[in-house]
Amino acid sequence: MKILVSAAEIQASVESLAAKIKEREGNRPLTVIAIMTGSIVFLADLIRKLEMPLRVGVVQTSSYRGTVRGPLSINAAMMPDIAGRDVLLVDDIFDTGRTLQEVIASLADFQPRSLSSAVLLLKRGRQEVDLRPDYVGFEIPDEFVVGYGLDYNDLYRNLPFLAVLEPSDLAGQNS
Ligand code: 5GP
Ligand code: MG
């Protein structure tokens, strides 16, 4: 595989995202909602750089099997009450933008006081919605990336860096 963003570059970016979030949100309590499962590593690093009173919850969506998209489903059973709260939605990557758009629409039903969004990655030229995340770590080219929480068929989430898979990685990865 080919390394696209190193572990050190990711840490520097998370640091600067956290600084921007602190600047904008101040010291008000924040509820961070992560979209499972790709954002878990980003979530863990980001919240440890934030100092305001902070709640964490998760929602689950699924749209990919391998690299093929299916219909999107959203499960909010593991989300705390967000009515009247300032909410920061966190996802790994903004690709077409449909996931974030649909999750924002469903969270809006719970009537948060404010709702902003942070993604580690944005894939250049792929967006199919008008929405843009409030905080973006890196813009990357249109390639399928893994690592730092992102998977291919549930593998590679534990890599500390972001990488692009090569054909040799795809062959014989059935274990
Ligand atoms: P969107 O709805 O913006 O098209 O897709 C967002 C979701 O698709 C992300 O939360 C992520 O789970 C998945 N996704 C999009 N691009 C990639 C990619 O390059 N690698 C991986 N592992 N997942 C991706
Ligand atoms: Mg996802």
Image (tube, rainbow, N blue to C red):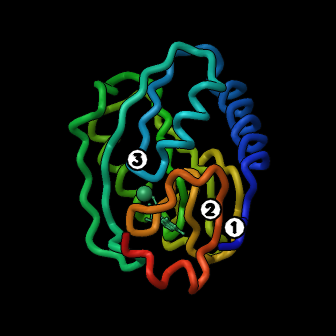
Spot occupied by residue 169 in the image (x, y as percentages of width and height): 55, 78
Q: Secondary structure at mark 1?
A: strand
The answer to which of marks 2 and 3 sits earlier in the sequence is: 3
Residue 35's tag is 3
**Which image quadrant: the C terminus?**
bottom left
Say which amino acid is labelled 2: Leu
> Tag 3 or tag 1, which sits nearer the N-term?
3
Q: Is residue 60 above or below residue 122?
A: above
Q: Nearer the viewer, residue 48 or 164?
A: 164
For the point 42% across and 36% down, the residue is 33
Circle 1: residue type: Ile
Q: Is mark 1 within 8 Å of ligand 1?
A: no
Q: CA distance from mark 2 to mark 3?
A: 15 Å
Q: Which one is earlier in the sequence, the residue at label 1 or at label 2? A: 2
Q: Residue at x 66, y 71 (%)?
A: 124
Q: Residue at x 72, y 66 (%)?
A: 3
Question: Callout 3 environment at 10 Å: few (<14), some (14 to 19), or many (20+)?
Answer: many
Residue 26: x, y in percent? 65, 19
Q: Nearer the viewer, residue 152 or 131?
A: 152
Left or right, 95 with respect to 102, comes to: right
Q: Which residue is mark 1?
A: 140
- Mark 3 beta carbon near ligand 2 (under 8 Å): yes
Q: Indicate the position of residue 23 as horizontal and vertical percent values.
A: 72, 26
Question: Could you tell me residue 56's position as x and y percent?
Answer: 42, 27
Does dot 2 land on a helix, a strand or a loop?
A: strand
Q: Amino acid at mark 3?
A: Ile
Mark identifier at residue 122: 2
Q: Are marks 1 and 2 in contact (CB under 8 Å)?
A: yes
Q: Does 59 appear above or below 112?
A: below
Mark 1 vs mark 3, CA separation in Å: 20 Å
Front-lying residue, 141 or 102? 141
